[in-house]
Amino acid sequence: MKNSSSKIHIVSSSNMLSLCLASFLAFQPGCGSWSGNPSVDGNNPPTGNAAIGTVSLAILGSGTATQLIASSVKVLGKNGTQIGILRLTQAQIALEGIKFKQGKDDAEERETFSGPYAVDLLSNSTIPSLSKVALSPGKYNDIQLKTHRLEPNQIPGISSTHPLLDNSIYVEGDYIPTVGSSVHLVIKVDVSEEFSLFEEGSTAGGAKVDSGSNLSILIAFRLNHWFDFSNQRYDFSDLSGSNVTIDSKGGEIAKSIQEILKEKIKNSADFGEDKDSDGKLSPTEDNDDQNDNEAISPVTGE
C-alpha cells in the first residue's frame, strides 16, 4: 500500500490554468489549460528536426488479468482484518484530462489527452476512446489526472441514465460481510480533483519517449486496494440497511467513507510502459518499484 502523504500532490484548477503553455516543438509561450492539441497518426510521425514520439494510452481496473475473480475485492475493517468482500457490478471514474510530466514539479504544458472521459474499470474501456498523442522526446516520470463531475451531453454516446452523470466516481456492488447479512451498496463521489501518479523516492524508470517512437502506456487503478479501512474511524460494518447509497447527501459515516475511497483510488493508480505488449501492467512494468517484490494473488490482490 502506498504512502498517500508522499504520493499525492493536489494542484488547484486555478493554479493549473495560470501555468504557461509551451509548444513542444517551438517552445513559444501561450495560455495553459486542460485542452490538448489534436492527436496525431502514430503510424506516420513527423520526421527531420521536428521528429517527435507518439504515446497510446489504456486505463485498467487491475494490474493483471488474474488479480480479480468475479470482480470481487477484499474489504478490510478498522482493525486491519478482513470483514468481508465486495462483489463489484460497477466501478467507473470520469476524468477531465491526462497530462504527461517529466517530474512532479514540471510546470510545462504539453500535449494531453483532453477529455472528459468516462472510464469503466471493470471492462477496461473508455468513452471516448483514447487516441494517440504526440510528445517531444524526453523521460516522463509522472502522469497527472483530474477527476471530473460529468454533466449531461458532455460525452457523445453517454446515455441520460449513465451512472457517472453528476458524479466523478461511481461504485456499486454487493458487500458480503464475514458475519451478517449482505448489503447492496452504491457509492457516489462528485468532487473534481487533480492528482499525480509520481511516486516519491521511486527508482523506477517512468516512460522514455524517443523521436519517432510509439509507446504504449498503461495506467492501472488497482481495485483491490480501494476498500482498506485500516485505522479509520468507520468501515462498512457501520452501515445499516440492506440497500445503502453513500453520496454527498449522507451524514458523517457517508462523508468519511467517500473521503477514504477517494484517497484510496488516487493511491491505487500506477503507470508504466507495456513493454511486452500484453495489455497488462505487470509489477516489473509498474512505475512504483515497491510493487516489484509484492506477490499478486486473486481476490486478495497484491
Image (tube, helix red, strand yellow):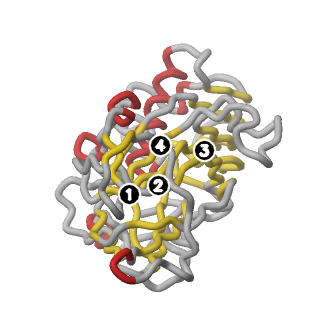
Q: Residue 116: which numbered mark, if any?
A: 3
Q: Residue at x 31, y 52 (%)?
A: 28
- Between disc 3 and disc 2, the foreground one is 2
Circle 1/circle 3 CB separation < 8 Å: no
Rendering coords of residue 17 (x, y %): 39, 34
Amino acid of disc 4? Trp
Number of other residues with Cα within 10 Å of mark 3, as a class: few under 14, some 14 to 19, many 20 or more: many
**Earlier sequence position, callout 1 versus callout 3:** 1
**Earlier sequence position, callout 4 versus callout 2:** 4
Q: Residue at x 71, y 36 (%)?
A: 184
Q: Does residue 154 lie above or below 103 as drawn?
A: above
**Earlier sequence position, callout 2 versus callout 1:** 1
Circle 2/circle 1 CB separation < 8 Å: yes
- Residue matched to label 1: 100
Rendering coords of residue 142 (x, y %): 32, 57
Amino acid of disc 3? Pro
In 3D space, how far apart are the residues under numbered discs 2 and 1 (Cα atoms)?
7 Å
Q: Does residue 166 lie above or below 143 as drawn?
A: above
Q: Secondary structure at mark 3?
A: strand
